[in-house]
């Protein structure tokens, strides 16, 4: 299972593609894509958003769903989804919003 | 300190204006990311894991209080209240917004700073000994030459699209603190038998995925030939350096594949063509630049200070600080002070906006308004009166930058690693923090003595792990962080590349492994005066290997 991710052009924020072509700042709100064709469609949507100056560096990444919550597989993506492990006061982990 | 002339000021302002327009066009959709990326990189702006990252140049690591205060202001206003000093004497901001960067560059230009050539395949910030102009062992201040190289290399049209990046380092002292032998060009100031200044020249050193020690191409390059010879090296590299494979594109690979003799002949042939041309350095120009770096007026004082001795007797932390964080000054009564940016359990090289403000104040009050950033990610006050040390120390304690650990096991170099960096394969900072905590008591550090641990979070080696007495390289193995350990590296005048000791360690295991290595050293050294590196070079890897993996 995959999600599509990128950084927002304007401020560099990590974002994921969600329903309706929105780019959301929490991975838990991302759309998931199963299978080659679905991922290709997601990436095409990402490429379009890149052309429209919304995001940069679109790529797909592996996730699993644990207790109904989307969780990245790789540590790199876990850190991107939360913020620096050395600075719990910065990044998404610091935002006081629940999923 | 060097002051911008009208050429410097106008090109920095022009670049700021150009970048402002480039950002505008990017946001308006007139430039694609593919078009914009090389432009932003030429201005030091990267895209990292969580955000953009702006790397600001600190030429040869020298700055003054006003500039440091500006960096504090940028951290506070446009970032999250901190900056990170790098292993090339620069500073990085981890959270700037793209839309704010033109404004940041404008603010930097106000204090004669910029981010030009801190990225990209060009000649990067020239680095120098952080005790330059102050050290007792110095032949001459290397910074005038670094400044001359900066002027020559800034926006050099012929060298803006090199096969790969190009790094130059220079030291003015026989004890190399600038790691010149692991740079693309390393310059070691020297005097010939007539007492004239010149340079030993090394070419093709470097770290990264193929670490190599630089090869000497000149025993004595006269001062006047500095630029012509550098240009000759760059021309040969620009012509023959590989462009088919970015991992084989550095000059070290060219040296390796071509062979030293042939390459040297190419350089000399190119040099002969241009040595009497416009790049020949006029003596009066060198002396004019040198005048900018004239030392502050320092009154010769007693070699020891009663105030320092009295405080040492009553304050163990101060005694520890004095024992480790001072470097001998050429003027009796003065010393160069290392402000450790390595608090126990802290993040190597990070400084808060408040700390930067304090450092700026201290430079003005106690240090003739001079500051240096070391490639070891610390801050230096190069000219401090011995008698001022107790008062300075009190201010450092209040700002939490008073750790007396310079050169000790907790004075760790670490790259940002996977906590920030898009290239990283593992985290570096948390490993540094855990090692620092494990060995952090004053007694234990002092007992172990000089030991340089350097940690990189990927094979690109920004954390200089290859030249750590103990080097740690973070990799990914089956989705987990995994750390390879090397021993015996050194970046000084007796440079060496560390050797991999055996299979790597998990994140959980790696600090225990380091402790075993340290304990092995403590058990085998002939005395306290034999450092870890000396002991390793004397006895070799076998006992260390046995300690880690058991007898074969």
Image: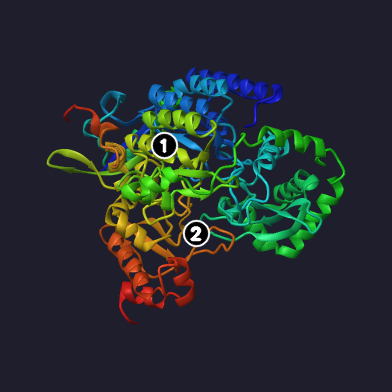
CA gap, disc 2 and disc 1: 32 Å
A91 relative position to B272: left or right: left
Q: Position of residue B56 (x, y in %)?
A: 52, 33
Name the residue at 64% across, 56% down.
B204
Quarter of the rendering containing residue B492: bottom right
**Could you say where residue B537 lies in the image, as x and y percent from the top left?**
49, 72
**Front one among B3 and B369:** B369
* Quadrant of residue B482 within the rendered picture: bottom left
Q: Would residue B347 appear left or right of B37 to someone viewing this image?
A: left
> Secondary structure beneath disc 1?
helix
Count of marks overlaid on the render: 2
B279 vs B547: above or below:
above
Quarter of the figure that contains the C terminus of chain B: bottom left
Which residue is identified by label 1?
B392
Q: Which residue is farthest bottom?
A: B552
Q: How is the image coloured?
A: rainbow
Quadrant of the frame with the N terminus of chain B: top right
Say above or below: B494 vs B186: below
Residue appearing at x 51%, y 49% in the figure: B327
Q: Residues within 10 Å of mark 2 (few under 14, many from 20)?
A: many
Q: Is any atom of residue B477 visible in this view?
A: no
Residue B529 appears left or right of B194 = left
Most foreground residue, B297 or B441: B297
- B538 in relation to B129, above or below: below
Q: Is residue B56 visible?
A: yes
Query: Disc 2 on helix, strand or loop?
Result: helix
Which residue shows up at 48% across the image and 75% down it? B538
Is the residue at mark 2 from the same chain as the one at mark 1?
A: yes
Crowding at dot 1, Cα within 10 Å, few <14 / some 14-19 / many 20+, comes out as: many
Instruction: Say which chain tag 2 marks.
Output: B
Which residue is label 2 attached to?
B467
């Amino acid at each position: 299972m995959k999600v599509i991710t990128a950084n927002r052009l304007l401020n560099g924020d990590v974002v994921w593609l969600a329903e309706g072509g929105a780019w959301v700042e929490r991975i838990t709100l991302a759309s998931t894509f199963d299978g080659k064709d679905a991922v290709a469609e997601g990436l095409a949507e990402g490429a379009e958003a890149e052309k429209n100056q919304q995001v940069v560096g679109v790529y797909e990444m592996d996730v699993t769903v644990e207790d109904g919550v989307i969780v990245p597989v790789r540590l790199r993506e876990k850190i991107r989804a939360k913020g620096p492990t050395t600075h719990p006061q910065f990044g998404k982990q610091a935002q006081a919003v629940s999923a | 300190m060097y002051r911008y002339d009208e050429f410097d000021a106008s090109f920095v302002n022009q670049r700021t204006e150009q970048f402002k327009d480039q950002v505008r066009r990017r946001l308006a959709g007139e430039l694609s990311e593919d078009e914009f990326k090389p432009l932003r990189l030429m201005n030091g702006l990267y895209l990292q894991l969580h955000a953009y990252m702006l790397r600001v140049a600190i030429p040869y690591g020298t700055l003054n209080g006003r500039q440091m205060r500006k960096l504090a202001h940028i951290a506070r206003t446009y970032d999250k209240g901190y900056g990170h000093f790098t292993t090339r004497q620069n500073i990085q901001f981890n959270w700037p917004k793209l839309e704010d960067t033109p404004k940041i560059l404008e603010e930097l230009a106000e204090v004669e700073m910029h981010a030009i050539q801190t990225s990209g395949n060009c000649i990067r910030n020239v680095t120098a000994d952080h005790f330059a102009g102050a050290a007792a062992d110095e032949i001459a201040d290397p910074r005038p030459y670094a400044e001359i190289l900066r002027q020559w290399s800034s926006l050099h049209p012929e060298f803006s699209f090199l096969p790969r990046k190009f790094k130059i380092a220079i030291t003015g002292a026989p004890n190399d603190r600038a790691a010149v032998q692991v740079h693309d060009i390393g310059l070691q100031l020297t005097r010939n038998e007539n007492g004239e200044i010149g340079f030993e020249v090394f070419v093709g050193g470097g770290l990264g995925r193929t670490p190599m020690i630089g090869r000497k191409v000149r025993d004595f390059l006269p001062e006047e030939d500095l630029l012509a010879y550098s240009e000759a090296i760059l021309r040969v590299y620009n012509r023959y350096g590989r462009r088919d494979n970015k991992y084989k594109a550095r000059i070290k690979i060219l040296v390796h594949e071509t062979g030293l003799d042939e390459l040297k002949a190419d350089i000399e042939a190119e040099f002969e063509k241009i040595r009497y041309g416009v790049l020949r350095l006029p003596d009066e120009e060198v002396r004019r630049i040198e005048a900018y770096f004239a030392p502050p007026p320092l009154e010769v004082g007693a070699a020891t200070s009663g105030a320092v001795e009295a405080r040492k007797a009553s304050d163990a932390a101060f005694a520890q600080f004095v024992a480790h964080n001072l470097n001998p000054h050429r003027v009796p009564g003065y010393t160069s002070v290392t402000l450790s940016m390595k608090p126990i359990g802290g993040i190597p090289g990070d400084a808060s906006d408040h700390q930067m403000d304090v450092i700026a104040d201290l430079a003005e009050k106690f240090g003739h308004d001079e500051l240096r950033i070391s490639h070891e990610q610390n801050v230096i006050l190069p000219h401090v009166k011995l008698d001022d040390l107790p008062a300075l120390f009190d201010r450092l304690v209040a700002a939490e930058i008073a750790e007396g650990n310079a050169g000790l096991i907790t004075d760790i170099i670490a790259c940002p690693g996977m906590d920030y960096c898009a290239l990283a394969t593992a985290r570096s900072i948390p490993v540094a923090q855990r090692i620092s905590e494990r060995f952090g008591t004053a007694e234990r550090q002092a007992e172990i003595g000089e030991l340089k641990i350097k940690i990189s979070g990927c094979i690109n080696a920004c954390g200089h792990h290859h030249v750590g007495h103990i080097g740690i390289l973070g990799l990914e193995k089956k989705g987990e962080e995994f750390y390879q350990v090397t021993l015996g590296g050194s970046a000084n005048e007796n440079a060496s590349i560390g050797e991999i000791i055996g299979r790597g360690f998990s994140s959980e295991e790696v600090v225990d492994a380091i402790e075993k290595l340290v304990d092995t050293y403590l058990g085998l050294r002939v005395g306290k005066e034999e450092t870890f590196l000396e002991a390793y070079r004397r006895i070799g890897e076998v006992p260390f290997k046995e300690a880690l993996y058991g007898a074969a």
